[in-house]
Image: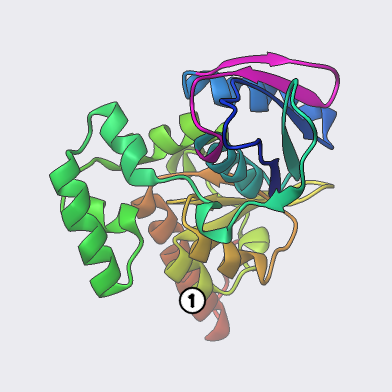
Amino acid sequence: MATVASAPAAVETRRWRITIDRDDAVVALRDYFRRLGLSSEVDGSTAVRLETDESADDVGTWLASWANVNGIPAQLDPIGLPLPLLLPVPPSTAAPRLGELLIRKGFITEEQLAWALGEARATNELLGIVLLSAQMIFEDELARTLSEQLSIPYISIRGIGVNRQVARLLPADVGMAAAAIPARANERAVQVVFADPTDPRALAAVREFLPTMEVAVAELSDIRSAWREITQTAHTGARGQTHRV
């Protein structure tokens, strides 16, 4: 979703301008890069200016992560260089590397990440779920790390619950497999809460049913518990008993 204008290989670009089409998201984008340790300032109503020693590939990957999660197209251009051909960021870089974020926080080691990645590939599970199952991280560590790094809301499902009518917009089996549940809706979109919103498979699966969504994050056990309650209530209702929605 993000596009990056590549600079000539011989030039080390340190200043960038990011343009988006949503003026209400500029501050969130600026804060996202600040949390990554980059110098970032608002540059007009729909742009952010960066100054960094990081490579173009890294900056492009981080921007693609933010754009993918928030559903907002973004363009990255070098400042002070001729405008070259615009190239799309490869889909494989569309999501941030969850393991790297957790290593930076000190929650896991590189050895633990290597094991968990192998286990995720072998079992076709989400990386976050593998780490939780192996008790390498706590659920709140995972959820709050993702919320901070991606500039998306952290939702306490146990505290505020979900709107069951909204939740039923997504098939329960899809939601359980993606570790995601629609929580509430507004005039613009449906807010969908994910256990791991960096996983492109989970995002793609939900977008098949809810193409316009706002992404949030919550604990995996709370998402699964909410789905169990909803499906049990649905089964009770099918048997003719009364239930509250």
Of all residues shown, which one is farthest toward the front? Answer: 10
Name which quarter of the figure residue 72 lies in.
top right
Residue 34 lies, in percent from the top left, at: 54, 18
Residue 174 lies, in percent from the top left, at: 52, 73
Q: Residues within 10 Å of mark 1 (few under 14, many from 20)?
A: few
| Residue 200 horizontal side relative to residue 169, left or right | left
* Residue 187 showing in the rendered view: yes
| Residue bearing mark 1 | 173
* Residue 133 showing in the rendered view: no
170 w.r.t. 21: above or below: below
Quadrant including the C terminus: bottom right
Residue 45 drawn in magenta: yes
Looking at the picture, tell me which residue is in the foreground, 96 or 211.
Answer: 96
Residue 111 lies, in percent from the top left, at: 13, 46
What range of the chain is rendered magenta?
Answer: 38-57
The residue sitting at 66% across, 41% down in the picture is 6
| Residue 83 horizontal side relative to residue 33, left or right | right
Which amino acid lies under the numbered mark 1 shown in the image of this protein?
Answer: Asp
Of all residues shown, which one is farthest toward the bottom? Answer: 239
The residue sitting at 52% across, 18% down in the picture is 38
Looking at the picture, tell me which residue is in the foreground, 192 or 96.
Answer: 96
104 w.r.t. 27: above or below: below
Q: How is the image coloured?
A: rainbow
Looking at the picture, tell me which residue is in the foreground, 241 or 155.
Answer: 155
Looking at the picture, tell me which residue is in the foreground, 68 or 11.
Answer: 11
| Residue 149 horizontal side relative to residue 121, left or right | right
Name which quarter of the figure residue 139 lies in.
top left
Number of marks: 1
Q: Secondary structure at mark 1?
A: helix
The residue sitting at 38% across, 45% down in the picture is 98
Residue 159 lies, in percent from the top left, at: 47, 38
